Amino acid sequence: MRFFVPTDIYVEKNCVKNHAQNMLAVGKRAFIMTGRHSAVMNGSLDNVTEVLNAGNVVFQVFNEVEENPSTDTVRKATLAARDFKADFIIGIGGGSAIDAAKATALLLLNPDVDADDLHKVPSHRLDHAPVVAVPTTCGTGSEATPVAIITNHKIGLKKSIPHVIFPELALVDGKYLAFAKKQLIVNTAVDALSHMVESILNVKSNEFNRMCPEYGLRLWGECKDALLSEKKIDEGLYEKLMLTSTIAGMSIAQTSTSVPHGMSYDLTVHLGTPHGPAVGYFLAAYTEVCGKFVPEDVQKILSLLSLGSVGEFAAMLRSLIGTCSVTREMRDKFAASMKVNRSKLDLVPGGISPEDVDYIYEKSLIVEK
Ligand SMILES: [Fe+2]
């Protein structure tokens, strides 16, 4: 059994400031990658640049990372980072910013690799520049994983690139959630929930690496009522939600995600569905199917979430993220492509049949009349 997360992770209030020396030790020329607005609004960009200024680390900000970052964006960022002579990359934001930072860190040191070739499996391990991750949403867990999900629009592919890129340093502060919309917090928390459920219902799950998702699911269960309520989330829960998300990232760093994530990508690429709901729509039916071979694991998940049945689990997810409608033609097309996605199907404990795949789509998506 093995447990491997080589990232130096701090989870605490004001941790960017508190651990300034750790960030300053990473490099001398920082290329900061983030989205258009949120890092300015929630103060995370200011927190990081104050530390860099005080430590005489020069920096350049690239604020063009979009949701579901593309190979084109990563290429553009890499050219700018190379011009700037960056020696490390800081990703500030949700999974999109951190994943784009990882891919840019890889291309920065590999000028022979084009961004559109990022998904090709390399014949040998490629080096990457160090990455610092400052998450501002509570779902991706990318600060604690080697994964970077990048979209290549030219071939309609949203997938993790096959390179292992753990951040060197992760500074996780719940206070940035204060500026996020409630539905964004809910959507990203559903992503974190999926990471932990898919990590347990996984052939790579074992007694050792389960310590993360089991602890994280208990924490998630403690946030459940606040997520379901109409009210604004109490500030006291921000740090717990962020911690849960990082633990969920540590969970999939050991096992990787499974079928619900595999199914989600078509919804995002073809319908623009945000990542958390796109995964969450499939989660209850996947759990039900896994119950055939690993009923004790399903029971464990439900009890950690204080839920009585898979039906209650499905109802909770519907309250959080609603439902998703697609045409029959689309659903059949998505199911057909999932049936050959061995990298995800082979992770299902006890195996999964084509009929099970159809069943999950039938239960999870509403067919438009
Ligand atoms: Fe995810």
Image (tube, rainbow, N blue to C red):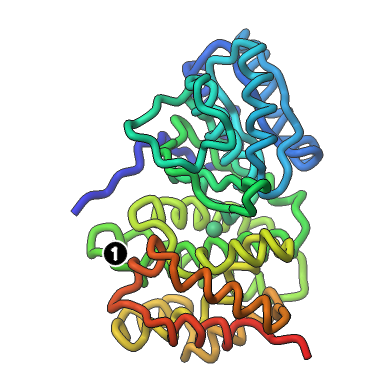
Residue beneath disc 1: 205
| Residue found 70% across the figure and 63% down from its top | 270
Name the residue at the left extreme: 1
Q: Position of residue 192 (x, y in %)?
A: 53, 61
For the image, the number of numbered tags is 1
**Closer to us: 354 or 167:** 354
Q: Position of residue 223 (x, y in %)?
A: 58, 68
Q: Quarter holding the C terminus?
A: bottom right
Q: Position of residue 249 (x, y in %)?
A: 46, 52
| Residue found 53% across the figure and 42% down from its top | 12
Amino acid marked by disc 1: Ser
Q: In the displayed structure, would residue 355 be above or below residue 29?
A: below
Q: Secondary structure under badge 1?
A: loop
| Residue found 60% across the figure and 82% down from its top | 364
Q: In the displayed structure, would residue 180 be above or below residue 40?
A: below
Q: Is residue 144 visible?
A: no
**Closer to us: 335 or 77:** 335
Q: In the displayed structure, would residue 309 be above or below residue 129?
A: below
| Residue found 41% across the figure and 34% down from its top | 8
Q: Is residue 355 visible?
A: yes
Question: Image quarter for residue 36?
Answer: top right
Q: Position of residue 236 (x, y in %)?
A: 63, 57
Decide if ligand 1 comes within 8 Å of the CB at mark 1.
no
Question: Image quarter for residue 92?
Answer: top right
Ligand 1 - quadrant of the structure image:
bottom right
Q: Classify residue 335 as left or right of residue 329.
A: left
Q: Classify residue 211 as left or right of residue 60.
A: left
Question: Image quarter for residue 74?
Answer: top right
Callout 1: 10 Å neighbours few (<14), some, many (20+)? many
**Closer to us: 218 or 13:** 218
